[in-house]
Amino acid sequence: MVNSKRLADEFARQAGIASPSFREGEMCRYLIERFERLGMTVLMDDAGPKVGSECGNLIATLPANGRDCEPLLLSVHMDTVEPVEGVRPVLRDGVFTSAGDTILGADDKAGLAEIIEALEVVGEQGIPHGMIEIVVTVCEEKGLLGAKHLDYSRVVSKRGLGLDTAGIDRVINTAPAANKMRIVLTGREAHAGIEPENGVSAIVAAARGIANMCLGRIDHETTANIGTIQGGQATNIIPRQVVLEGEARSHDPSKLQAQTEHMLACLRDAAEATQQVIQGDLVPVTIETEVLSDYPHMAVLPGAGILKLIEKAAERLDRSVDLQDGGGGSDANIFNGHGIETVIIGTGMTDVHTIHESVRVADMVRVAELLVEVIRLA
């Protein structure tokens, strides 16, 4: 049923459009025209100006045809990471790669192309279906900004599939919650060569704190990282201030809170240990902390309706799907937080966020076939 050449051509057209986060305008215009050719009603919400993008999120709706059933949401994002300027997809031996030193954009254009091909097949075959909503977000790669600012009053579905992970025949039904942290440590500057004893180094305090942290893989549910360090002015100046940015993730909210507090406590203790008495006065290292919830925990229980739907669709194709825990956040975290029961399925993309990114046409065909059966059974 799936037309592999049409699918490959569709992906090539999309991958050839550079659409880094905040600059998705050209891709958005293409998708509006493409969805309308499929007979869909397309609207754009007001997320664009809220997040600083050239366009808002798209909500494309295909009315029910021959079936009265619960609406189904299909979710993807239109932005990519960089480098992407001048991207040229190349198809060789059934595998798409980038022709140069850019990413390919299979994350998430493989998912977009698979959805479009599935809808082409549904139309050609006259397959009865319920109402289908496609939500295409902006700025997913910049902290799920499009999903966080989506106009949910325009979405009616309460169940959905997100196409946004590597591999095929795999379903992600859980994902961690995450906290982002920003910590500012401030000591006292001094000339490093002439009077170093009069300075209190913020970098030393930060280093002590980080050295005492448990980071990386904490347990099977929890990870943590300090990702950026910025501070100091010159090699001959005792650094007055340093700014740290980090994160903690966990499938267990209590573990997330405990890990976040552990990281902050390490820095508070280090700040206190680094303070000094200089010329009779106590010179402290002050600490300012900001903790933001980046996205909520996602957990769709085995046996949920959306999982049964995917499993039944796979059975019709004499396949099985592998249910897995996720380690990252996606738009699906946000959708679940808004009461839309959403899981994530693999699109075939590999080596995402690198210039070695690729996707096999045969894998995209396989995903499109699964989508056709999901729509048929929904």
Image (cartoon, rainbow, N blue to C red):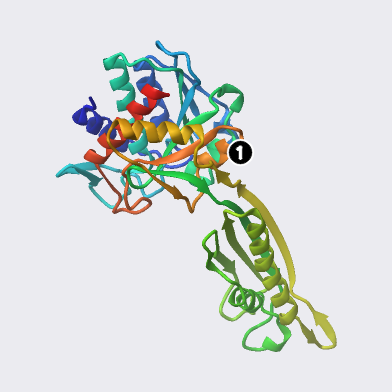
Q: Residue at 72% of width from left, 71% of height from top?
A: 268
Q: Residue at x 67, y 68 (%)?
A: 262
* Residue at point 26%, 40% (across, down): 363
**From what the image shows, is residue 147 above or below residue 31?**
below
Can you say whether 48 is above or below 204 in the image?
above
- Closer to us: 90 or 251: 251
The one nearer the camera, 374 or 144, is 374
Give the camera-side residue of 185 and 342. Answer: 342
Is 137 on the left-hand or right-hand side of 269? left
Q: Secondary structure at mark 1?
A: helix
Residue 365 visible to an observer of this rendering: yes
Which residue bears the numbered disc 1?
Answer: 337
Tell me: 299 left or right of 37.
right
Farthest-out residue, left: 93
Vertical arrangement, residue 123 with respect to residue 363, above or below: above
- How far across and how far down the image is residue 331, in percent? 51, 40
Q: Residue 248: x, y in percent?
A: 59, 59
In the rendered view of the protein, which quadrant contains the N terminus?
top left
Q: Is residue 24 left or right of residue 184?
A: left
Relative to residue 111, is residue 217 drawn left or right?
right
Among all residues in the image, which is located at the extreme top? 66
Q: Is residue 195 visible?
A: no
Q: Position of residue 107 (x, y in %)?
A: 37, 43
Question: What amino acid type is highlighted by mark number 1?
Answer: Gly
Q: Is residue 344 above or below residue 291?
A: above
Quadrant of the image occupied by residue 187? bottom right
Say few, some or many: other residues with alpha carbon within 10 Å of mark 1 (under 14 / 14 to 19 / 20 or more). Answer: some
Q: Quadrant of residue 276?
A: bottom right
Residue 324 locus on image (x, y percent):
44, 49
Q: Quadrant of the C terminus?
A: top left
Quarter where residue 255 is shown? bottom right
